[in-house]
Amino acid sequence: MTDTTTDSQGVRPHAGIPLEHPDAETAHATERAVFGFWIFLMSDLVVFALLLATYAVLLKGNSSAPGPAEVIELAYAFPETLLLLTSTLTLTFATVALREDRARGVYGWTFLSLALGAGFLALEGAEFAGLINKGHVPQVNGFLSGYWLAIGTHGLHVAIGVVWGLILIAQFWIYGFCPAIRSRLVRFSLYWHMLDVVWIAIFTVIYLPGSLVS
Amino acid sequence: MLGRLSWDASPFYGVIPAIAASVVVLAAIGTIVLLTVMRRWRWLWSEWLTSLDHKKIGIMYVVLAAIMLARAFIEAGLMRTQQALGAGAGDVGPVGAEHFAQLFSTHGTIMIFFVLMPFMTGLINFAMPLQIGARDMTFPWMNSIALMLTIGGAGLVMASLVIGKFSTGGWTGYPNFTGAEVNPGVGPDYWIWALTLGGAGSTLTGINIVATIWKERTTGLDHLMWMPLFCWTSLCTALLMIFAFPALTVATVMLWLDRTFGFHFFTQGDGGNMMQYVNLFWMWGHPEVYILILPAFGVYSEVIGTFSSKKLFGYTSLVWATMAIAVLSFTVWLHHFFTMGASANVNAIFGIATMVIAVPTGVKVYDWLLTMRHGRLRFDVPMLYAVGFIVTFVVGGVTGVLMAIPPFDYVVHNSTFLVAHFHNMVIPGSLFGMMAGATFWFPKAFGFRLDETWGRRGFWFWIVGFYLAFMPLYVLGLFGMSRRMATYLHPEWQPWLIAAWAGAGLVGCGLICQAIMLYVSIRDRERLRDITGDAWDGRTLEWLAPSPPPEWNFGARPVVTGRDEFGERKLNDEAYPVPDRTAYRDIEIPANAATAPLIGIFAFLLAFAAIWWMWWLVWISAGAIFLLVLWRSMRFDLHRQVSAETLYQADMAHRRTILAHANGDIGSGAPMRHARGTEGYLAKERREREGQA
Amino acid sequence: MPPRRTVAALAAIGLPGLAEAAGALSPNGPVAEAQLGILLTALGLMAIVVLPVWLLAAVFVLRYRSTAGQTYRPEEDFDLKVDLVIWAVPALIVIAIGTIVWTRTHQLDPYAQIAPGDSLRIEAVALDWKWLFIYPDLGIATVNELALPAGTNAEIALTSDTVINSLIVPGLAGQIMAMAGMRTELNVVADAPALMWGRNTQYSGEGFADQEFRVPVTTPEDFAAWAETARRERPLDRAAYCNLATEGATSEPRRYSAPEGGLFKAIMMQYMDQDRGRLCSDD
């Protein structure tokens, strides 16, 4: 029994942390890591808030074509939304499976979530390719710069998430369900859910008003 | 292959730049030779660079700050010299217009990002975990990465002296001046990437500090209001870092996309909006002022309490005032650009919001003064800085309120009045606090105090030099002198600028005194030895540990029962009890990590390559960072075990040292000359011995 | 004591430069006069907080130094009455100054006309590293010279055909920023004839330090005569403007007649309207 903290004895794992009968030290380590990650996510959310605010400012100042009417269409955004929202649900199933120590459930649900995320990225890639074909690249005007950066940053986050998730699955495979990697899955799921929240904000600020004008 | 890097990037476009570049190169070569000759490479690598010990990381931050302060001061001296000689039109004076612009840009960038930020991060890193009875920061590896990113950013600014030129856009880097159309060179890119690396490091540090204060407090400190005030100010600073730095990152990344890939965030025309940059920049920039100043407020609170030998007056008020300042700092950014033509309503509201901050700040000043009342004041160097701060800082406060009145700001915005004002805030407000903190905790870090005589000389040169250098700038600002002018058409300004130049000279003498202080202190370290670990009759937990503290800080983590825990223990003769063997457990401490400095090196390369458009190197560096993180994620033996017996024996040894010191067997007694509590402790020991005899 | 006399008293002490180049300290117009008044009033109010700080610091440092043997109360750490006072007094002072902020910011809004009567319209364009002043009603334009008739409200519209600039005339009014694609405004009234100066305060590149212009304030009669001489100069057509905009720093004042109609708006619109080309690149 080691003791890096005197108060770890009294700590119970947070209700949202899927650890099966953890010892006090593991529970404390996980809780610290998750707490730190929460703070990081808040910082990251500020980034997205500012990207959207800048988008709004640039949209307001835009005086030339292409504007939202030419660029924004729900044909991609709607299925993208469905994929991402579903993936957040399936990842929740993965964490439930982790709590209940069902290995196949963890692998299956995590992998399905990543596949849905990859599907989202494929659709987004197709949307971007279409924009490039029409010449709607970010170099055209401020509105397009803001549009590409806000959505691109979110897409980059999803891409990083997919890579991260694949690494996690591999690490589960290699090292088994050890506390350190369980803790990583908890943080990964927080990250993934946050990307959902951000997407909803993007959909509300960029796609919905944009589709109304077109 | 080399992107846009060519022989044109060599620094031989002027005498001063060539000399500066030679100094940097020679200093680098000198350091390498010295380390090789003294066979210190292994020591540097395994004792310092790869260490995850929060104390060593803190010390490295402060060393970085000291090196960068030397450079930034030389630049300030050059600017003062240029302005003292710059009466006339065109190219009068030793420094050309473009070089002058590089000087004010690097000076500001370095002082904020690579002197004050690492200085205060270093002090928090060193002292805060000790004060809350923790063994380390919550995320030691991330702590080391943050340090390495900061060093990488500073490295970029140094590299710009040798390869290419730095930005001429000032430390604020407003577009469209820094846009690709007006400034196509690498200068603004150096600036962008130095800030981005430093900013990423600061965000990680902020997360780490908050997690540490929230999760690592020792038993008893669940009473937050028993925390030392420095911990409160660290917490508020860290929260500001977490929420403010994203704005800077977003602004600089957008500017970089504009410059490098032709985006239109802040361009003139094509739907860009440069005012959005100004908004984003100051959404970070104003909280940044408090990020720099709050930790210094914490240091002053510790110093004034300790050297008044008294409890801090109005602790609760000080805590609430700190939090009020932190929250309000997000509501006032617009006062940096009242002159941008916003409506009177907007300007007035932001002006009043700005003044509201003066209220909690005023409360703090009075609480510090009232702590001194009915105290026993000892004027050691940290206390000199604290008193100098109180007296000087209010001048900056007054001019700050003046500038918060929009119609008056119209007069002095962009003038040397503004330059004087913010130097008046950050020199006494932040830099003096950092110096006080460094002097205060130096014996804790190294086991011996800094030489008093040279420390005092340093202080007096600094404070007199400060007044002489900056009071004339207030006056010149009212005369209508703009900031950032290399020359001027008004010869009647010259006497004031010569006075300011003399002030800079005095500050330079102060720096020299401090360098001598360091040398003398190391030479006379036996005379200055801090045997007990309690060099100043301290009141908080860090003085309980030996100096320097062991890697694990405390053999058994102390239990806190009130504010000023250690001071109270000394009063009750309970400061150095016989260690209880059953209280010791085996512990784990973080093992060294080579991944952190390697990530720092690749981050530097990535940024350097992005500046010079060497895209292959960007991808290689990014890939290397990814692999290093992946590799680390597959290591599970990240800790070293320390046995309970080791901890116990170390504490016993420390206690024997204190007993020997109490008996007069070792030491000159000098380090304990103030130790009020220790006297009681000594008496008790003597009684016990007599009782036994 | 009225602000001007306070400053005169200081000048009499012999502080260098105060008499010659007092800028904000020797106002020649109602705006600058009011700004100086704000400075002195706010300083006076803040003295209520600041002077005690200095006094207490001096007293406590002398009285409670460890060798002085004065009362020592190490446990003294709170006093409700004291706490209330140190929160309330700064708060009251901030309320007082805040009131000044609210009223004065509106009174001295740079967009608001100061003196009654017809305004003289002036359009200022920031260039590298000089200012172009267009007098659309008089059919003249100048570079590096902002001539003003005393006692008349001048309504200066600002924009930039280069990086951000900021226009100030110390002792008269300002400053306000000039930005490409945007229009800001500054109202000015000068009281008495005098030769003043103004400048750009926002760093704009190598010619920045010398980017000053003269501000001759004359009687309305002299001003009319001056305008008449300007009307005899060469006209400011598109080509002349484009030469001017690209030639860099010029320190000497210059005058032009017949500025091209709508030039100011055209300069502004080249950055506002994305479909429009740049003014000087298409020919």
Image: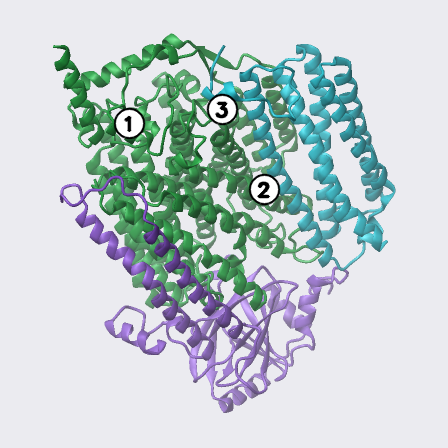
Q: Are marks 1 and 2 on the same chain?
A: yes
Which residue corresponds to mark 1? B569
Q: In the rendered view, tell whether residue C111 sits above or below residue B299.
A: below
Which residue corresponds to mark 3? B140
Q: Nearer the viewer, residue C84 or A88?
A: C84
The quarter of the image holding the N terminus of chain B is top right
Q: Which one of the lettered chains is coloured cyan?
A: A
Residue occupying the point 67% across, 30% down: A190
Residue occupying the point 48% across, 12% down: A2
Which comes sooner in the sequence, label 1 or label 3? 3
Q: Colour of chain C?
A: purple
Q: Is residue B27 visible?
A: yes
The quarter of the image holding the C terminus of chain B is top left
- Residue pushed farthest right? A75
At label 2, counting other C-alpha atoms closer than 10 Å, the crowd grade (few under 14, some 14-19, many 20 or more) is: many
Q: Is residue C128 visible?
A: no
Q: Nearer the viewer, residue B245 or B689?
A: B689
Horizontal arrangement in the rendering, residue C252 relative to residue B555 (left or right): right
Query: Disc 2 on helix, strand or loop?
Result: helix
Which comes sooner in the sequence, label 2 or label 3? 3
| Residue B246 badge | 2
Q: Colour of chain B?
A: green
Q: In the rendered view, tell whether residue B591 sits above or below residue B609.
A: above
Q: Residue C131's spot in the image, x, y percent? A: 55, 69
Under mark 2, the amino acid is Pro
At label 3, counting other C-alpha atoms closer than 10 Å, the crowd grade (few under 14, some 14-19, many 20 or more) is: many
Q: Chain of mark 3?
A: B
Q: Residue A127's spot in the image, x, y percent? A: 83, 40
At label 1, counting other C-alpha atoms closer than 10 Å, the crowd grade (few under 14, some 14-19, many 20 or more) is: some
Q: Residue B631's spot in the image, x, y percent? A: 60, 17
Q: In the rendered view, tell whether residue A143 sits above or below residue B134.
A: below
